[in-house]
């Protein structure tokens, strides 16, 4: 397994590609591509890994991924069941900055767009008024053509460029454009952690997945994520706890133990450090938002 370099199918003259993903679960391999990706989730829930970020996605979320950022929208386990009627549905826009560079960027008024695209090297959440307007435009795009289509896409770009529209989700862009060898190791490690984080995992065990010594693995992981292995594993486990708090009636302690935490006091400290609120506050806040 490795970070797969995608080639987005499109005409060489198109500066965007519109795509609809509607299937039981999203493509679940860590991958990257030179196009900038805008994803609007309509149905489905799971975990998003984008660079060094890991967190939940759910219907209504809107994400922007910079060029060559390794990412995967990993659907929850229940979406893989043959007996499930659940769907994963999203609309996506892929922006080809090379097409802009070849002609569009020569227009003086678009120099700001060029600079904006060049600075997109991470994973971003879009929120506020920009989120609502962009979502409407993305759903309306299939009904447009030619000049109307181009103008609507430029409106989307303008909304993305508004101050405060983008929330950067990454600590660093060190996972940006991994080479094949690095990507293979990271994909193996991340896949292993996502599948096994519910149980105790020793440093030696995860280092062996990457075929490295413990010391070499710690350096490798920290250099590319700016996070220690333990911190990243805790983030993954907290993300899994959040899913249980949202979708089950399990007690906080039961959810913590089910996701790999062996000590409740330690879990509470870790959860607050990552989420900025207690597990109880998180659950109550989400109930309020959804209710």
Image: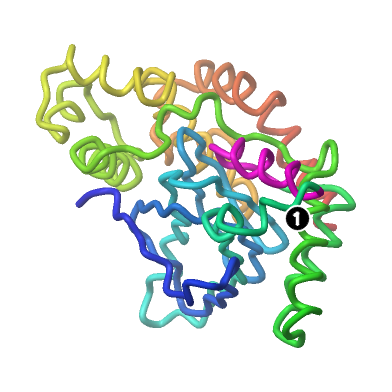
Q: Is residue 222 left or right of residue 131?
A: left
Q: Is residue 174 left or right of residue 1?
A: right
Query: For the magenta stretch, what is the residue range?
Result: 109-125
Q: Position of residue 75 (x, y in %)?
A: 46, 61
Looking at the image, which residue is at 73% across and 83% down? 146
Q: Quadrant of residue 9?
A: bottom left
Q: Secondary structure at mark 1?
A: helix
Looking at the image, which residue is at 42% across and 41% down? 258
What residue is pinned by disc 1?
A: 157
Answer above or below: position of 219 versus 76. Answer: above
Answer above or below: position of 236 versus 247. Answer: above
Q: Position of residue 247 (x, y in %)?
A: 61, 56
Relative depth, front residue between 291 and 140: 140
Looking at the image, which residue is at 62% across and 59% down? 103
Q: Quadrant of the C terminus?
A: bottom right
Residue that protrudes farthest toward the top in the picture: 215
Specify few, some or many for label 1: CA neighbours under 10 Å numbering under 14, 14-19, or 20 or more: some
Q: Position of residue 17 (x, y in %)?
A: 56, 72
The chosen color scheme is: rainbow
Looking at the image, which residue is at 44% across and 52% down? 34
């Amino acid at each position: 397994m490795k970070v797969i370099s995608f080639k987005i199918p499109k005409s060489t003259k198109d500066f965007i590609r519109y795509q609809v993903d509607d299937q039981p679960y999203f493509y679940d391999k860590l991958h990257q591509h030179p196009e900038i990706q805008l994803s609007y989730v309509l149905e489905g829930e799971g975990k998003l890994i984008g660079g060094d970020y890991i967190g939940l996605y759910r219907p209504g979320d809107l994400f922007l991924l910079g060029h060559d950022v390794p990412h995967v929208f990993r659907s929850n386990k229940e979406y893989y069941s043959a007996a499930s009627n659940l769907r994963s549905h999203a609309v996506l826009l892929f922006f080809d900055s090379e097409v802009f560079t070849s002609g569009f960027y020569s227009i003086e008024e678009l120099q700001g767009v060029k600079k904006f695209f060049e600075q997109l090297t991470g994973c971003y959440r879009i929120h506020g008024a920009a989120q609502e307007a962009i979502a409407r435009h993305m759903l309306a795009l299939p009904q447009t053509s030619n000049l109307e289509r181009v103008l609507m896409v430029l409106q989307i770009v303008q909304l993305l460029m508004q101050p405060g529209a983008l929330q950067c989700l990454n600590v660093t862009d060190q996972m940006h454009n991994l080479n094949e060898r690095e990507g293979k190791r990271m994909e193996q490690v991340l896949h292993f952690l996502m599948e096994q984080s519910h149980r105790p995992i020793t440093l030696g065990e995860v280092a062996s997945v990457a075929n490295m010594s413990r010391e070499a693995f710690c350096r490798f992981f920290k250099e590319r994520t700016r996070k220690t292995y333990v911190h990243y594993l805790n983030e993954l486990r907290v993300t899994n706890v959040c899913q249980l708090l949202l979708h089950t009636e399990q007690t906080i302690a039961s959810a913590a133990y089910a996701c790999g935490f062996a000590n409740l006091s330690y879990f509470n400290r870790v959860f607050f450090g990552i989420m900025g609120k207690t597990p109880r506050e998180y659950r109550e806040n989400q109930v309020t938002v959804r209710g």
